[in-house]
Amino acid sequence: MNKKLTESLENYLETIGMLIRKNKIARVKDISKELDVKNSSVNIALNVLADKGLIIHEKYGYVELTPEGKQIADDIQHKEDVLVQFFTEILDVDKDIALKDACRMEHTISDETLAKLIFFIGKIGKKNTKKTNK
Amino acid sequence: MNKKLTESLENYLETIGMLIRKNKIARVKDISKELDVKNSSVNIALNVLADKGLIIHEKYGYVELTPEGKQIADDIQHKEDVLVQFFTEILDVDKDIALKDACRMEHTISDETLAKLIFFIGKIGKKNTKKTNK
DNA sequence: TTAAAATGTTAGATTAATATAACATTTTCA
DNA sequence: TGAAAATGTTATATTAATCTAACATTTTAA
């Protein structure tokens, strides 16, 4: 159905994916802790995501990703990873600042720019490893 | 007073700055056209910006930037310019996509990362001009 | 095994950003 | 110069994202 997600909903999906990867399960409490919002806010977001067919959430149960939801979560996580790598390894930005920036920019970078950035990291990366910087 | 602006308010400020640079004046109509919103939305935003002391707007008159407002507008414009330059000159992203991406990311990139990016462009830029690519 | 603690849900309020529609002012030009 | 067009403003509504507070369910442990 409706494809375009808000930044907030993308963050919920990404967080659910991360929690499942880390803990095998995702609970409302874990999500609210991770995103620093209240359980009630999480519930509302989960209802929207469930309506869109991106998660499955039975009352008082764990939260699961549908295949489509997992696809989106993985996609956003990938963008974040690429951005963090660029910021830390190539620009030499501090890890925590890099992560903070990436967590916001991951929602706005286009697929085209991401692809070019990945290509660029590949090119530059080789040079850097040769130099054995550090 | 209150310093942190929303992305929307930053866009209004930046647009006002751009219009003044281009046309000497900024009118409600120009702002709404540029941002693709209605005049009524612009008016509401202008009231908020005026409350924060970032613009001056007399009824039915032109919109002006206070020194503080101009400072912020210039700062955001600078971030956009740096991002566009990086995307187009170094990543080789199409101009219109670069601009679209930069217009969103300019609100989230930190000062630290921006500084490192500017430094990196300076380093890389020299190499690229030597190579006379194209 | 049940009472307390932890967790989850729902109802109602708030804030920000937008829109439409009605109305006000200013500008243009016949 | 005054009527029409353009532009600006205000009132009211909607949507998204959050909150607090009250209530419901599940889990834990004495």
Image (tube, coloured by chain):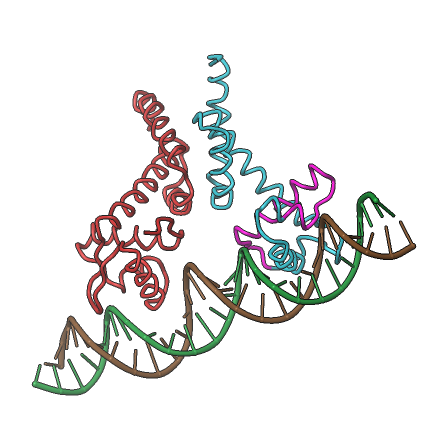
Chain colours: A red, B cyan, C green, D brown
Q: Is residue A115 above or below residue A28?
A: above
Give the side of residue A65 with respect to residue D29, left or right. Answer: right
Give the side of residue A10 with respect to residue C4, left or right. Answer: right
How far from the left and from the top, in percent, is residue C29?
Answer: 82, 43
Q: Is residue A91 above or below residue B28?
A: above
Magenta stretch: includes residue B3: yes
Q: Is residue B78 above or below residue A116?
A: below
Magenta stretch, main secondary structure class: helix
Residue at screen point 44% across, 25% down: B92
Magenta stretch: includes residue A18: no
Give the side of residue B127 with respect to residue B31, left or right. Answer: left
Residue at screen point 55% across, 54% down: B5
How far from the left and from the top, in percent, is residue B125?
Answer: 49, 22
The total number of labels drawn is 0
Return the residue nearer the eye: B41 or C15: B41
Give the side of residue A119 with respect to residue C4, left or right. Answer: right
How far from the left and from the top, in percent, is residue A46?
Answer: 30, 61
Return the residue nearer the eye: B18 or B75: B18
| Quadrant assignment, res B60 | bottom right
Q: Is residue A87 above or below residue B55?
A: above
How far from the left and from the top, in percent, is residue A82?
Answer: 33, 37
Quadrant that contains the N terminus of chain B: bottom right
Residue at screen point 40% across, 51% down: A7
The part of the chain drawn in magenta is B2-31
